[in-house]
Image (cartoon, rainbow, N blue to C red):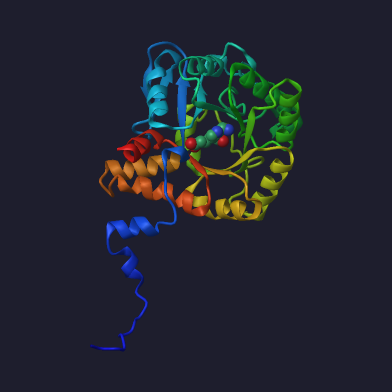
Amino acid sequence: MKILGKYPSLRLRRNRKYDWTRRLVAENNLSVNDLILPIFVTEGKNKVESIKNMPGVYRYSVDKINPIINKASKLGIPLVAIFPHIKNTKKSSMGTEALNENNLVCHAIKKIKKNNPKIGIMCDVALDPYTNHGHDGIIKKNEILNDETVEILVKQALLQSEMGCDIVAPSDMMDGRVGIIRKALDKNNFKNVQILSYASKYASNFYNPFRNAVGSNKNLRGDKKTYQMDYKNSDEALREVALDLKEGADLVMVKPGMPYLDIIQKVKDQFKVPVIAYQVSGEYSMIAMGIKNNFFTKDAILESLMSFKRSGACAVVTYFALEMAENLNS
Ligand code: PBG
């Protein structure tokens, strides 16, 4: 019997040897409770439309959304995020359709709440699906006006809440909007409506497929760099988050996801609040196309989503939510 072992005495591979030991020592796990499903809705009837560069993702007319919501609900997905695609003829420079109580989002909220009262609904607070210039706010002489836009956003958030939306999610990046929305909600008996602030949202190249999905791509004049963040910065993200929390945000978003895992980790470390990651449309497209072209297998989806858990996110908005939930439940 030999007494002295050989170098190395510590072998990290021992904990990786079998599936059971890998499961035993896993530091992070993904469950259906971590998934938020974005849903695109469109006007008209009897429509399920495919979306350019987003294989497997569809736009539904409101009369067609029950099956996907039922499915999400059955699988245990806690929250869906609604995004509207409206006709160009309804878009205007002020985005007034956003405040129409008969608009697409209002119909969708009511329909979902009627059939699936237990699933959470989140709505974007921003004007880009409604403006004919594709910007999140209103414009005067090439400037996206901050305070004037916030006045409209407050009304949009109130309308969504009135319809039954559970979480309003300002994704517009105007300054000061979270505090004003919070005050208005409280004053109007919506003190239990949560605010998920897109606190650190970058002016990203990865949003393009989404802009096709909501029909704002062709309209968009210029870029969004005067209000969305510069991807060279990370201290600034922490300032944005600090401000939104002070103004009353219940949850904060980092967006996009995979190129910004460092930001998620910093926000979580510094503020200890619920951080949501958004695996945006361009990230979805890259992975979905990779799978379609056999560059890698579907296992890449779980790997990508686990990176968010590792970095400290409590949940992920992902176009893979349904597929992933089915997989986790099987
Ligand atoms: C609109 C909004 C965008 C996304 C979510 N809300 C696009 C943008 O800011 O131009 C992007 C989501 C995605 O790419 O999946 N304010």
Quadrant that contains the C terminus: top left
The residue under the point 43% across, 43% down is 283
Q: Reply above or below: 281 against 161.
A: below
Q: Position of residue 28 (x, y in %)?
A: 44, 53
Residue 135 quadrant: top right
Q: Reply above or below: 21 against 153.
A: below
Residue 324 quadrant: top left
The residue under the point 31% across, 85% down is 5
Q: Is residue 87 visible?
A: no
Q: Position of residue 217 (x, y in %)?
A: 50, 30
The residue under the point 28% across, 47% down is 297
Q: Reply above or below: 182 against 256.
A: above
Residue 243 located left or right of residue 6: right
Residue 161 quadrant: top right
Quadrant that contains the N terminus: bottom left
Q: Spot the residue most to the front.
A: 1
Q: In the image shown, does 116 or 86 lie closer to the viewer? A: 116
Q: Spot the residue most to the left.
A: 1
Residue 117 located left or right of residue 227: left
The residue under the point 53% across, 51% down is 312
Q: Is residue 121 visible?
A: yes
Q: Reply above or below: 197 against 312.
A: above
Q: Where is residue 129 in the image (x, y as percent from the top left)?
A: 56, 25
Q: In the image shown, does 87 or 235 lie closer to the viewer? A: 235
Q: Position of residue 326 (x, y in %)?
A: 33, 35
